[in-house]
Structures are given as C-alpha cells and as structure tokens.
C-alpha cells in the first residue's frame, strides 16, 4: 500500500494512538474490485472517545501561539507535498480517479494547509468606536471549540484539508469521519500530521461503515461546537436537524445542479474544453460538475458536433494507466443512477449522441455520454446525476437561459461562455449561485470562498472567509475609564 506502513494500515487514529478494532470493513479498488485493506469499523463509544480526546486537547491547542500553529501546519503541508506521488497513488487505488487528477487533488488539498498556515497569523480582532466616553469596545476572535468534519469520497484528501486546515489554524481540534469508501487517504493524512508534530488529540480519524451511528454522536455531543459537512443534500439536512438540539454552528457543502451556458457569441472551442473539464473530471462525480449544458439555438448544432468529437476520444480505464482521462464510478449504485437518467431522457424524447451504457471494460466503468434535445420534463433537469452524462438543452434568449439556470433548488456553481461584456455582467448578476465561472471550466482554489446558496449549503471554505467558520466573536465592553 503506498505510504501507509503495514503496522497502522488496519487502525484508526484517536488521541494520538493508532487504534485497531475487532470489527473491520473492507476498502476496495473500484477499478478492479480488489480489497485493498480492512479498516476499523468503529462505533458510538469510539466516536465519543475521539470527541473526548479533542476536548482534552483543546485548552492547550488554543493557547499555542498563532506562530506555533502556523509552523505545524506548514510542516504538514510540506510533508503532504513531499509525499504527493504516494498519496496520489493511494487515492487512485481507493477512489478510481486518474493518477493525474489525484496528483492535482494532492496539490489542491495541500494548498489549503499552506494558505491557513499563513492565515493563522492574521486572525485579528478589532476595536470599534464606543458608545460612551468612559467605555471601549473590544472584539476578540476566538476558536469555536471541537470541530467534527464529515467528508465525502469524491475528493478524499481535499475535502478533509479544506475543513481541517482552517479549523486547526483557528485553534480548534478536529474529529474527522471520512467516507466509508475512502478512509485510507484520511488515515495517511493523519499519519503525516502525527509526523509533523501535532499534539495528541488535536486531529482524530474515526473510520466506520455505519455513518449514522457516528454522525449521531458528532451532532449531539455538547462538546462538539461545530459540524462541517460535505456530502449530499438529504444527509446534510438530517445532520442540520440533529445539530439543532445543541445549537451547534454548522457548515454544509451539499449537492449541486450546475448549469453550463454557451451563448451564441462564445468561443466555441474554449467552451468545449471548459465543458469537458467541468463535466467529465472525476468521472462527473464532483459537486461543482456541470449537470446541465444550456446552449443557444444559433450555435447548438456546432457546439454539439465539437463536444461529441472530443467526448468520443476520451480514454476510459484504470486510473493508474497512462492516457486514461476517465476512471470507474465509485460503485454500482452510481452506475444505476447514471443509467436511469439516460433511460429517462431517451424515453422522453432525448437523442443519444454518444455513449449511453456501461463501458465494455465492465465493473463500474461507464461510457462518457452526450444526450441532445433535453427538456425540463426529464430527471436530468432537476436531479444531480453525479456521473459522465452531458445532457444538452436548447435556449433562445438570455432571459430564458437565466430562468432555466435558476430553475433548481440548488445553487452551488454555474458556468457560462460569452464575449459581449454587457451580457456577461447581466448573466453574472442574474445567476442565483454561490460561485460563477465566466469563460472558465474550473473555479476551485484555496484563495476564493467556495460554497453554495439555496439547498447547496451554508458557509464557505477557502480564503479568509473560511476561517470565520471556525471562530466566534467575543465582544468585551470595558467601562469606567
Ligand atoms: P453522502 O451524503 O452520502 O456522504 C457524505 C458523508 O456523510 C460520508 O462520510 C458518509 O459516510 C456520511 N454520512 C452518510 N450518512 C450519514 C448520516 N446519517 N450521519 C452522518 N454521516 C453520514 O455523500 P457522498 O455520496 O459521499 O458524496 C456525494 C455528494 O456530496 C454529492 O451530492 C455531492 O454534490 C456532494 N459534494 C458536495 C461538495 C461541496 O463542496 N458542496 C463537495 C463534494 C461533494
């Protein structure tokens, strides 16, 4: 196994100790079905132990100077990057994405650790004009307390660092509950964090195959002060409701239904490249993935031809092989959902342009697919497909494009390609989304606030705004001066 030593491969990480368990669950390679490892299947008691460890570590961790926390984060960043290749291989083995994308994710995930190592030193409070000559108003920014991070399988590394780096920088210890499909990357990150010198209990990883049991503890234990979740909207809603009992602060990075709009003045070649990156990256299993392509009538046929000729050249296969740009889907359920969306679209009058079925390689490999003539009556209009299906809708006016783009309960990312600057401003302002990419197919960076509106979530990750999610403001009124 790349990176993880044999002695800890079957253990979770709690209170600075590598903890085994009698009950374990298998982690499999989605490209081959091979069992990679068996990790501890921890329960509610273990989750409470992890919370206790974090709670014990908190008073000391928050009192470390910003510079001490920053230098530990910096060491963690350097060690992640020094092990980029091994981490990337591990991720491709357990998640399936092509090795090039895994390398990119390691660098992207590490960039949050680097950024918050720097930002830790800038967590300033403020003084405000006061309401009396003998009074002063001071505002302190304090760490919120123990953080629970529940993360998905589609970005096994970056979704962890995007939460943990700002939490640790702010002075909060974390309990990580990684997705059951991809716990090995989380354990490797913990191993590197231990090596970087984080004190015991500051970073804990609870692996489990029954997430609801762990989630129940993390959302109801009063010692946990913040839950940061990335995953599906239904699970996010449930966790949010569970957090209400102890009024925990919560961040929710949830599902999307991203529109990708191509206007008739767009650079079509650039739009096709953007669409390929945004739609098929990670086999279409990305929350900001294009879910709907909306193309203006005047360029509809030309765009479709160019898109189809690019998509039919895409090489599908094991992510470890050279030249592969699309790996397997994560599991059988993911394949079934993509197929159901295709069947539904075709049954309602859609036209299959390319792909459309499981790949000849078998397993969970699926053909990159394009469907034309898609309308709002089809499931793909309202549901997140989370797979390599590009449904292409047609529109006439700018107003219609904006209306179609906004006709969803989601509001994570939106993309559009156009040249006219007045149109660019109008559309940018009209889109009800947390993130908008103009003439770009990829927008995530540690330097910008990532997050959604409507049912795509609450809160932001990345940039200086990301730190706010893990701090509380304390107002102190000093009187009698
Ligand atoms: P999921 O909601 O099934 O699982 C996410 C995490 O929640 C996993 O760790 C899982 O074990 C855990 N979980 C599941 N049920 C739980 C429960 N009852 N209590 C506590 N924890 C529970 O989502 P997924 O299938 O892993 O990920 C795909 C979804 O994540 C998609 O909808 C995608 O759009 C979304 N996503 C969003 C972002 C974002 O930043 N907005 C990023 C990546 C993925």
Image: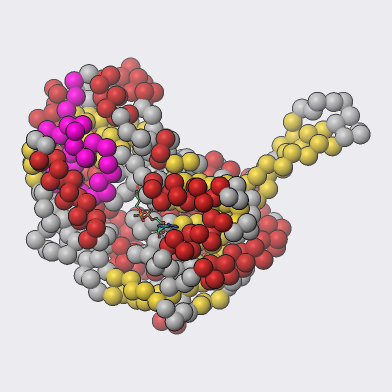
On screen, residue 190 above or below 391: below
Instruction: Find residue 111 and report its horizontal and vertical position in percent.
Output: 46, 52
What count of labels does the image hold? 0
Q: Toward the viewer: 454 or 88?
A: 454
* In magenta stretch: residue 53: no
Q: Toward the viewer: 36 or 320?
A: 36
Instruction: Find residue 18 and report its horizontal and vertical position in percent.
Output: 51, 77
Image quadrant where one finds the C terminus: top right
* In magenta stretch: residue 386: yes
Look at the image and tell me whether residue 468 can be seen.
yes
What residue is shown at x 58% (from left), y 50% (from top)? 245
- Residue range of the region highlighted in magenta in the rendering: 369-396
Instruction: Find residue 8 and report its horizontal and vertical position in percent.
Output: 45, 78
On screen, residue 215 above or below 271: below
What residue is shown at x 30% (from left), y 29% (from top)? 407
Give the side of residue 474 with respect to residue 256, left or right.
right
Image quadrant where one finds the N terminus: bottom left
Q: Toward the viewer: 358 or 109?
A: 358
Residue 64: image quadrant is bottom right
Give the side of residue 314 with respect to residue 274, left or right.
left
Instruction: Find residue 373 and report its horizontal and vertical position in percent.
Output: 12, 33
Look at the image and tell me whether residue 270 can be seen.
no
What residue is shown at x 31% (from left), y 75% (from top)? 36
């Amino acid at each position: 196994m790349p990176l993880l030593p044999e002695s800890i491969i079957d253990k979770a990480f709690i209170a600075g100790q590598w903890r085994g368990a009698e009950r374990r669950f298998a982690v499999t390679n989605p490209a081959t079905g091979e069992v990679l490892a068996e990790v501890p299947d921890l329960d509610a008691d273990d989750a409470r132990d992890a919370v206790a460890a974090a709670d014990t570590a908190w008073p000391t961790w928050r009192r470390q100077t910003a510079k001490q926390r920053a230098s530990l984060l910096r060491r963690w960043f350097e060690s992640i990057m020094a092990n980029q290749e091994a981490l990337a291989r591990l991720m491709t083995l357990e998640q399936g994405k092509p090795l090039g994308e895994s390398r990119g994710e390691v660098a992207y995930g590490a960039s949050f650790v680097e950024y918050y190592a720097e930002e830790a030193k800038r967590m300033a409070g403020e003084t405000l004009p006061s309401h009396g000559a003998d009074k002063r108003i001071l505002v302190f920014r304090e760490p919120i307390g123990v953080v629970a991070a529940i993360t998905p399988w589609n970005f096994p590394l970056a979704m962890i660092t995007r939460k943990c780096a700002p939490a640790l920088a702010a002075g909060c210890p974390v309990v990580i509950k990684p997705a059951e499909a991809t716990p090995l990357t989380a354990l490797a990150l913990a191993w590197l964090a231990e090596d970087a010198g984080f004190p015991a209990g500051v970073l804990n990883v609870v692996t489990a195959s029954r997430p609801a049991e762990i989630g129940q503890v993390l959302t109801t234990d009063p010692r946990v002060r913040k839950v940061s979740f990335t995953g599906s909207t239904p699970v996010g809603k449930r966790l949010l409701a569970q957090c209400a009992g102890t009024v925990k602060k919560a961040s929710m990075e949830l599902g999307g239904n991203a529109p990708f709009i191509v206007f008739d003045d767009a650079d079509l070649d650039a739009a096709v490249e953007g669409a390929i990156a945004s739609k098929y990256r990670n086999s279409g299993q990305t929350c900001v993935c294009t879910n709907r392509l909306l193309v203006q009538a005047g360029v509809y046929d030309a765009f479709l031809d160019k898109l189809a000729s690019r998509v039919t050249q895409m090489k599908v296969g094991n992510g470890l092989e050279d030249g592969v740009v699309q790996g397997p889907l994560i599991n059988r359920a993911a394949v079934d959902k993509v197929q159901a969306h295709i069947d539904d679209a075709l049954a309602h009058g859609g036209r299959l342009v390319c792909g459309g079925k499981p790949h000849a390689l078998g397993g969970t490999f699926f053909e990159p697919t394009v469907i034309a003539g898609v309308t709002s009556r089809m499931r793909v209009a309202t549901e997140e497909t989370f797979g390599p299906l590009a449904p292409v809708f047609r529109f006439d006016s700018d107003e219609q494009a904006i209306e179609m783009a906004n006709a969803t309960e989601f509001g994570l990312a939106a993309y559009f390609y156009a040249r006219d600057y007045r149109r660019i401003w109008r559309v940018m302002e009209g889109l009800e989304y947390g993130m908008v990419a103009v003439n770009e197919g990829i927008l995530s960076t540690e330097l910008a606030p990532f997050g959604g509106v409507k049912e795509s979530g609450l809160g932001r990750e990345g940039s200086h705004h990301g730190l706010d999610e893990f701090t509380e403001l304390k107002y102190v009124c000093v009187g009698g001066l």
